[in-house]
Image: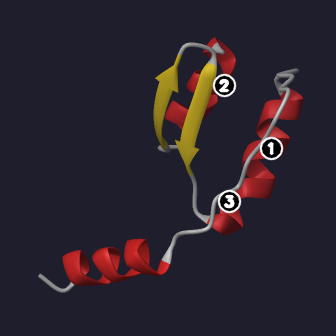
Amino acid sequence: LKRTLDIASKEGFHYTVDHRTVEIVIDEEKIPSFLDSLSRASVTYANIKIEEPSLEDFFLQVARSSQ
C-alpha cells in the first residue's frame, strides 16, 4: 500500500484510501506508465477497476472549467 501511495504522490495523482483499497484518479493516457511504475516497484494487486466518467460527471467537469 505504501509503495502505491508513494508512486501516486510522486506522479501527482489524487487518491483516497479506504482500508486496503486505494482509488487513484489518473488520466487515461497515463494508466500504462503508472502500471509500469507499480510493476517496477514490485507492487502486487488483486484487482484494478477502470471507471469511465458518466455523462453527468463530464457535464459537471465542463461546467466547472467554464467558470
Nearer-the-camera pick, 50 or 37: 50
Residue 9 lies, in percent from the top left, at 50, 32
First in sequence: mark 3 vs mark 1: 3
Q: Which residue is mark 2?
A: 4
Residue 48 lies, in percent from the top left, at 78, 42
Q: Which residue is mark 3?
A: 30
Decide: marks 2, 3 in contact (CB < 8 A)? no
Instruction: In the rendered view, tell whether residue 24 sits above or below residue 58.
Output: above
| Three-letter residue code for mark 3 | Lys
Q: Is residue 62 left or right of residue 57?
A: left
The residue under the point 19% across, 86% down is: 66
Residue 51 lies, in percent from the top left, at 64, 59
| Three-letter residue code for mark 1 | Leu
Instruction: In the rendered view, tell whether residue 49 sits above or below residue 29.
Output: above
Q: Which residue is mark 1?
A: 35
First in sequence: mark 1 vs mark 2: 2
The residue under the point 70% across, 55% down is: 50
First in sequence: mark 2 vs mark 3: 2
Q: Secondary structure at mark 1?
A: helix
Residue 26, image quadrant: bottom right
Distance of label 1 from label 2 (alpha carbons): 10 Å
Q: Tag 1: Cα neighbours inside 10 Å, few (<14), some, or many (≥20)?
A: some
Residue 28, image quadrant: bottom right
Nearer-the-camera pick, 17 or 43: 17
Instruction: In the rendered view, tell whether residue 17 sits above or below residue 29.
Output: above
Residue 15 lies, in percent from the top left, at 48, 36
Q: Tag 2: Cα neighbours inside 10 Å, few (<14), some, or many (≥20)?
A: many
Q: Is residue 44 left or right of residue 54?
A: right
